[in-house]
Amino acid sequence: MPVKDTDKPLGFRDIAESLTLTSEGWKAEICEGWKQGRTVYGGLSAALALEAVFRNHSDLPPLRSANIGFIGPVTDNPVYKTEVLRQGRNVVTIEAKGYVDEAVVITVTFAFGASRESILDVNCPMPEAKSPALYEAYTPEQIRAFVPNFFHNFDTRLVEGSRPVTGADKGYIRTWSRHFDTASREGISSLFCIADVLPPAAMPVLTQPGPVSSMTWMFNVLSDNPETEDGWWQIESDLTAAKNGYSSQIMRIWNSQGELVVEGVQSVTVFV
């Protein structure tokens, strides 16, 4: 079955609820509105892997970390299979794989861990920012037709940094972002989905357009139950190195109260 086309905008929660258990695994129906070129948006593919885990494994402690490998393009509706790799006293490690035509297209290793008392309590302060309503959209109206389909599912406002292919001195982007669909703003899977919303941090430095593709992504969750006000997350992506066709970036997410809830790193292939 091809990726579903529909005139009705489908939010993340609609897509997650489309997961159907088949003899092959959990199968999702994904509409064209969530595509990124020829593949499904990576944040959605990863978040659906987490949804499949929740359907197969109950009573899990909070998610602490995820290691994602974007193996190949998700050109069709993916099927997810999950497996418990280890059930420890404190940490449960589960692997999820997404398949298209029996070929692996995404792998995610999740670590779920119980909370413990600790003498450590360290937070990376959120950079200063005004209310989201005071910032302009990341994509001005005149260029919205040229951005990937999936980006239209998110309300993203530029706080600091640059837009893609502007020849910026620094590869840095900081935004306020949330799901347009209000039903899609709650839960760790929703946060996982929006966490990859920004273009690669190398793109503002570029002076000419060209293909880029996320290769791997590490995602650390720093809160038992990440929550924010009105769905708004402050998301930062910072280019740390780029050479030989690959780039590395640090990614952070704060909630509206200034608590760092996610920190990660992503490796990106750059064909320019």
Image (spheres, grey):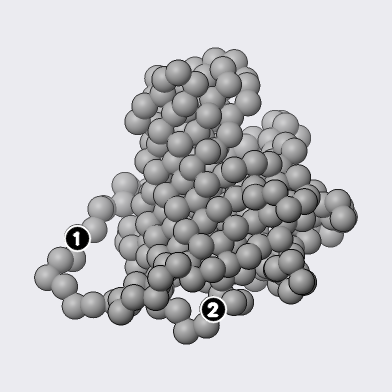
Q: Quadrant of the N terminus?
A: bottom right
Q: Quadrant of residue 82?
A: bottom right
Quick check: 133 above or below 266?
Answer: below
Front residue of 158/271: it is: 271
* Residue drawn at (37%, 57%) of the image: 220
Quadrant in the rendering for residue 185: bottom right
Q: Earlier in the sequence, mark 2 or mark 1?
A: 2
Q: Residue at x 58, y 29 (%)?
A: 212
Q: State how many labels appear.
A: 2
In the picture, the disc for residue 72 is: none
Residue 202, x across and y down, in percent: 47, 28
- Residue that label 1 marks: 122
**At 84% across and 59% down in the image, what residue appears?**
8
Q: Is residue 266 left or right of residue 155?
A: left
* Residue 162 x/y as whole percent: 48, 30
Circle 2 is placed at which residue position?
57
Residue 101 placed where, x, y %?
77, 51
From the image, which quarter does the C terminus lie in? Answer: top right
Q: Amino acid at mark 2?
A: His
Left or right of 47, for residue 75: right
> Is 99 rendered above or below residue 245?
below
Locate residue 36 relative to residue 43 in the image: left or right: right
